[in-house]
Image: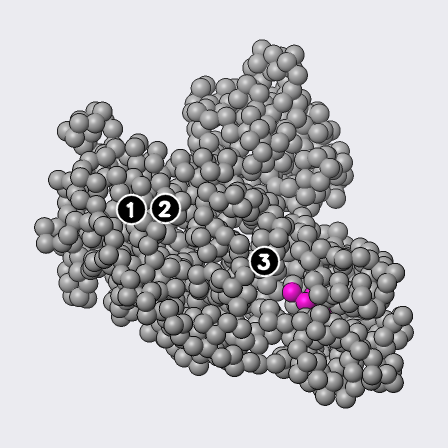
Amino acid sequence: MSARIGVVTFPGSLDEADAARAVTIAGGEAVSLWHGDDDVKNVDAVLLPGGFSYGDYLRCGAIARFAPVMDTIIDAAHRGMPVFGICNGFQILCETHLLPGALTRNDHLHFVCRDQKLRIENTASAWTRDFTPGQEIVIPLKNGEGGYVADEDTLDRLEGDGRVIARYLDVNPNGSRRDIAGITNERGNVVGLMPHPEHAVESLTGPSTDGLIFFASALSSLMAGAGQ
Amino acid sequence: MIDTVDQAARTPEVEQPYLELGLKTEEYERIREILGRRPTSSELAMYSVMWSEHCSYKSSKVHLRQFGEKAPPSDALLVGIGENAGVVDIGDGWAVTFKVESHNHPSYVEPYQGAATGVGGIVRDILSMGARPLAVMDPLRFGPADAADTKRVLPGVIAGVGGYGNCLGLPNIGGEVVFDESYAGNPLVNALCVGAMRHEDIHLASAKGVGNLVVLYGARTGGDGIGGVSVLASETFDDEGPAKRPSVQVGDPFMEKLLIEATLEVLHAGLVEGIQDLGGAGISCATSELASNGDGGMHVWLDRVLLRDPTLSPEEILMSESQERMCAIVRPDKIDDFLSHCRKWDVEAVVIGEVNDSGRLTIDWHGERIADAPPRTVAHEGPVYERPFHRPPWQDALQANEATTIDRPGPKEFLNTLLELLASANLADKSWVTDQYDRYVRGNTVLSQPEDSGMIRVDEETGRGVAIATDCNGRFAKLDPYAGAQLALAESYRNVCVTGAVPLAVTNCLNFGSPEDPEVMWQFAEAVRGLADACAALGIPVTGGNVSFYNQTGDTAILPTPVVGVLGVIDDVDRRTPMSWGPDGELIYLLGDTRDEFSGSEWAHIRGHLGGHPPSLDLEREKVLGEILVAASRDGMITAAHDVSDGGFAIAVVEMALRSRVGARLWLPDDVDPFVQLFAESAGRAVVVIPRSEELRFTEMCAARGVPAFRVGVVDSGLGADTGHADGSQVLQFGEFFTVSLDRLRDANSATLPALFS
C-alpha cells in the first residue's frame, strides 16, 4: 500500500493540486485535508502547499497557523510525522514555530517568478534523503515574501547543526540570509522550502523533474520508518 | 428622502441631473417615454450606467454586427457573441471560453488597482459561463519607455496584474508590452482570461423559473467604483450621504479566489439555474440582464444587499462597481444547499430577489417602490447611434510617406542596427515584467512568454490543450485600419499555428479614440470591417470581445489598436512546437516571401518614422502556412518554429538562439537585398527548424502547397573559435556580414527594461 500524504487546503491555497499531482507521480497517495477539520484522516505525512492563505493578510501564514487542522499537524510533527511546507507552507511552519525564523518581503520589493538553481545541503531530512549531498537542482521559485531571516545565533545554530537543507545558487532571489532556501527542524521530519518542487515534476510543464526527489524522499523515509 | 415611483408619477416637473450622468436630452426623453413618467432617481441611475457607451455599445453596435453576419460556419461554436464570453468546443467533451477586455482609464488614474481589477473582472466573466478559469494574459501598451509618466504607470500596472493574478492562482502565460508615444496619456491595459468546462457545465446569464431566488454573493457592496453617481449623491439626492467616491474599484483577489471555488462547487452540484458576474454597472446590469434573458420579470429587495458602508443610498448601491460579487438564480428547494457551500468558503450570500413573469424589473427599498421598468429597455434596448465617419484628410499624405524615404544602413552597420533593435523598448526582453507573474501555478503551463503563444493543458489524461496569442501593431492600423486589423489577426493566428495548435476562435479588444470624432470612427469602422472579413477568410468566428473608446489625450487619439486574440486547440500538448531549436546540424528554414516592407516596422519606429502602407497580406497564404505548421508538428517534422514579425527575420532567429542558448550559421540569399532580408516585416512568414531526416518530406509538403521555403541556416554550437570568439562560446553568424556572440546579443536585449524600471 502506498504512503498516504495529506495536502491541506486553506482558504487562498493555490498549489494544492500541484502538490497532490507531485505526490501521485512520485508514487504516493494524495489525500485532501481541509483547514477547518482537526482530522487528518490517518495520513502518514503532511504537505502545506503554496498560495496566499487568507490573502496573506496580517502577515503571511499568521492566520492559517490557527486553523483547526494545524493543531493536529503540530502534534503529529512533534511525534515525528514528516511535514513539508512549500512557500506559503514554509511561512506557516515558521508562524507555528515548528521552524525558526521568518520570511520577509523580498529585498527588491517585487514578486519574482524564476527557474532557480539550488544546492541541496542536507540529505538526512525526511524530505531530502534521496538527494546526493551537494546535488544541484533547478526548480521554480515564485514569491513576494521569501526573504529568510533569523537572528545570527539561530543562523549559526542552523548552519552548525546542518539544518540548512537547500541554498540559492547563482542568484539570491529575495535577500534571504546566507542564501538559505530551506531549513529543517532538529529531528529532520519538518522541512520548509521557499521554491516550488511541485512545479518541477514533469518535463512538459517544469524546468526539470528535480522536484520529484523531495516527494520520493518522503516516501522512502516512510518506508524506512515502517521497516524498523 | 427616497424618490419613489409614486412620487415620480406625481412630480413630472422635477429637474433631474441626467446630463451630469452622461445621458443626452433625447435619451432622457426616451426613458420618460418608456416609463410613461419621469424616472425615479434609482431608475435614472440604472439607465444612465446601462446606456453608457461602456455597457450599451451604442456607437459600435452597428459595426460589430458584421462579426455575426460575416462569421464563417463553425462547428466549434457552442455559445456565440452576446453572452459574457463565447464558448467553443475543443473536443473530448471539453468546452473552452475566453475573452479579452480593457481596463484602460482606471489604470491610468490608479495603475495598481486599475490593472488588478481588470484581471478580476475578466476572470469573473469566464467564471460566469461555468468554466474554471485556467490562465490569464495581459496585452499592455504604454507611452515612451523613458517618459516620466511611464515610470509612474508601468510599475504599478505590472504589480497590479501580478498582485491580483498571482494571489488568485492563475498562471499568466503571455501578452504584450508595447511602447508608443500615442499611449503617453492613455495607457492600454487589456486583460484576457481563458477557462474550461465540460459541455454539460455551460451556464448562461438568464433568470428563468417563476419563484426562483436571486442570490447576491461574494464581497459586500461598497462605495467604490461609482463614477457618475457621485454627482447624484453629492448634488441632488442626499446631502447627508458620503462625499465624492473614488471611481476606481479596489480589488481583493483573496475574495475572488474564494468566489471561484464556491461558484464552481455550486455549479457542479447543480444548484444554479442562471448566473451572472457583477462588473460594470454592478447590480443594475446583473438584475436587468438576468431578468431580460429569462422569464422577463424580477423583483428585488434592495435593502437586503449586504453593505460595507451603511450610509450608501439606493442609487449608489445600484451603480456600485464593487468587485468580487456574483449573482445566481437558485430554486427555493436548493437555496439552503447553495448557502451552505458559500458558508464553507466564508463567502457571504443573501437572497435579494425573486424571478417572476411580470415583464417588469421592480425594486423596493425598505418597503417603498423605487424602480419599475421593463428590464429589456434597461439591458438591451438602449440607444443605437450611426455615428458619422469619414476618411481623415491626412490619410493620403500619411500613406504617401513610405519608409523607403529613410536612409538605410550599409552592410557594415547591420550588426549595430540589430543590436539597436534588440535593445529598443519594444523588442527588448520582457522578463523584468513577466518575472513578476506566476507562470507555474496549477501545473498545466506548457508554453508561456516569450513563446509565440501561451499554451495550457486542459485534460491531464489525454493531453488536450489550448494555445492563445494576442497581437496588434497599432502603427499598421494607423497607416491602414482595415489592413492593420487584418494583420493583427494574421499574426495572432500565425502565433497559434507555430506552436502546433489549430486556430478555432477569435476575441478582440478594440481600443480607439473618441467615437464622436468622425476620423476616429472611420478608423474603427474600417478595423471592424477588416477584422470581420479576415475572420471569414480564415474560417474562424469572433466569439466575443470588448470596445474601448475615448482613448485619447485632448484631441489626439491613440494609435487605433484592435488587439486580436486567437485561441487554438491541440490534441496533445506533448507535441507542441517550442521556439528553441534542437541539436547541431538541424536545418533552419524561412517560410514565406520577404519583401521590401518597412513602413510601420520597428526599424522605421526607432528611426522616428511613421508613414506609408503596412505590409501586404495574403490571407489564403496565411491559412496554408498555418496548415503546414500544424501538419509539421503533428507528423514530427519540425523541432522548433517561430513567427517572423516585429523586427523581421534577424530578430526572430536571435530570439530563437537566445531561447535555445545555441548558436547557428545563417546565410542570406544572393538575390535579396540583405537589409530587407534581415529586417523587413513582411507578413506570412515563420522560421522553422527541421531535423535533416525530415528535410525532404517537409520541403515537398511546402512545394505541394505553394509556400516558399528557403534553407537559410544550420544549428551550430561550435562556431566560437572559428569566428574569433572564445572557444565554446555560442555565436550567430549572419553570412558574410557579421558574427556576434549570444552573450552580446543577450546583454543588448536584456538590459533595457531593468535599466528603465528597476
Going by the image, does B442 lie left or right of B473?
right
| Residue A36 visible (yes or no) | yes
Judged from this view, the residue extending furthest toward the left is B670
* Chain under disc 2: B
Q: Nearer the viewer, residue B158 or B693?
A: B158
- Magenta stretch in the rendered image: B280-284
Total of numbered circles in the picture? 3
Q: Residues within 10 Å of mark 1 (few under 14, many from 20)?
A: many
Expressed as whole percent of the image width and height from the top left, the position of residue B659 reads 33, 40
Give the main secondary structure of the magenta stretch. helix
- Up the image or down, A22 lies above or below A100; here it is below
* Chain under disc 1: B
Q: Write down the residue under mark 1.
A: B651
Q: Report the amino acid beneath label 2.
A: Leu
Please give the label number shown on residue B105: 3
Q: Counting residues from the N terminus, which is met first, the one under dot 3 or under dot 1?
A: 3
* Chain under disc 3: B
Q: Counting residues from the N terminus, which is met first, the one under dot 3 or under dot 2?
A: 3
Q: Write down the residue under mark 2.
A: B427
Q: Residues within 10 Å of mark 3 (few under 14, many from 20)?
A: many
Cβ atoms at labels 3 and 2 below 8 Å apart? no
User: Residue B91 is drawn in which quadrant?
Assistant: bottom left
User: Residue B599 is drawn in which quadrant?
Assistant: bottom left
Cβ atoms at labels 1 and 2 below 8 Å apart? yes
